[in-house]
Amino acid sequence: MPKFRPGRVLVAYKKSAYEAYFDEYKPSGLKRAFEAGDVNLAHLKRSHAEHYGTVREVLSALQERGLSVEAKTRGELHGVERYGFIVTVGGDGTLLEAARSVDRQPVLGVNSDPNHSVGKLCRADRRSFARILDRLLDGKAKVVEAARLSLRLDGRPLKEPVLNDVLVAHSNPAAMSHYVIAVGKRREQHRSSGVWVATAAGSTGAAFSAGGRALAVASSYFQYVPRELYYANRYGYRLRGGVLGADRRILLRSLMREGAIFPDGAHRRHAFPYGSELEIAATGKPLRVVVS
């Protein structure tokens, strides 16, 4: 394979929990607990040092290879199309945030602290990053195309492609979610805690914890998993979850006054009021993910 010449490289990194809690929000109760030696918070400072140590090593490895590099926090991402290669440093949340704006550039996720950061999609850490980078530049790295979901709300496409999963539920987590779900020719009303729809890349996350199946990252299949279906004597369900091919669609109609759609985590949401309809399909442009 030809060698890879990325041009400009973007390193997107998260802020550490220590930095967010104590340099920005400064919640007094949390700070008192930390200063008192709360064992549940003791790892924050160590993790902070590990994370920024990884950021420095990633930048150094890129610069040593003569690459043009720019680093931004994941909250400052804009103009991503100007870069030929994206490196994320943090965990899956950082990769998902960056992926919202990525078109065809390859993305390599670096787990900055494997002891505490969830990074199923992050195939590198500070020890393996330089080796995987060299394989990519030499044209020898394995790059897979991870399928993404596309969403249409009341006939209007939502701009963010979904790499991981989408949760459709009541906006209040304690309230019951009420909706109509249609898969193929089958259609029924559900009362539940909401429904997950996950890509193959997102299949080992929340959908798996809710009873779904783990799929290979490069699979084009996706799946839906209702959460905690409410079973009363007069409710029987047949659409209790399943894996669907890339040519299938899921339709959801809200029967909630305050429903919500959460694409790829808790940072974004769309209102899903009574009568609104959401179409979910595996037709989003795939993301090119470096895996080895």
Image: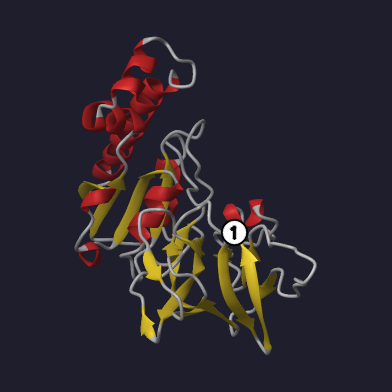
In the rendering, at what x and y percent does residue 54 appear? Answer: 36, 34
Query: Measuring 35% from the left and 49% from the top, which residue is drawn there?
Result: 88
Query: Measuring 76% from the left and 75% from the top, which residue is drawn there?
Result: 238
Q: Residue furthest front?
A: 233
In the rendering, at what x and y percent does residue 193 appear? Answer: 59, 59
- Label 1: state its secondary structure: loop
Residue 155, above or below 123: below
Residue 70 can be seen in this image: yes
Residue 68 can be seen in this image: no
Q: Observer-nearest residue: 178 or 1?
A: 178
Position of 70 with respect to 134 (left or right) is left
Question: For the image shown, how many numbered marks are present on the structure?
Answer: 1
Q: Observer-nearest residue: 207 or 103?
A: 207
Query: Measuring 38% from the left and 68% from the top, which residue is drawn there?
Result: 271
In the rendering, at what x and y percent does residue 247 appear? Answer: 59, 85
Position of 81 with respect to 137 (left or right) is left
**Residue designated by label 1:** 193
Q: Amino acid at mark 1?
A: Ser
Residue 136, above or below 158: above
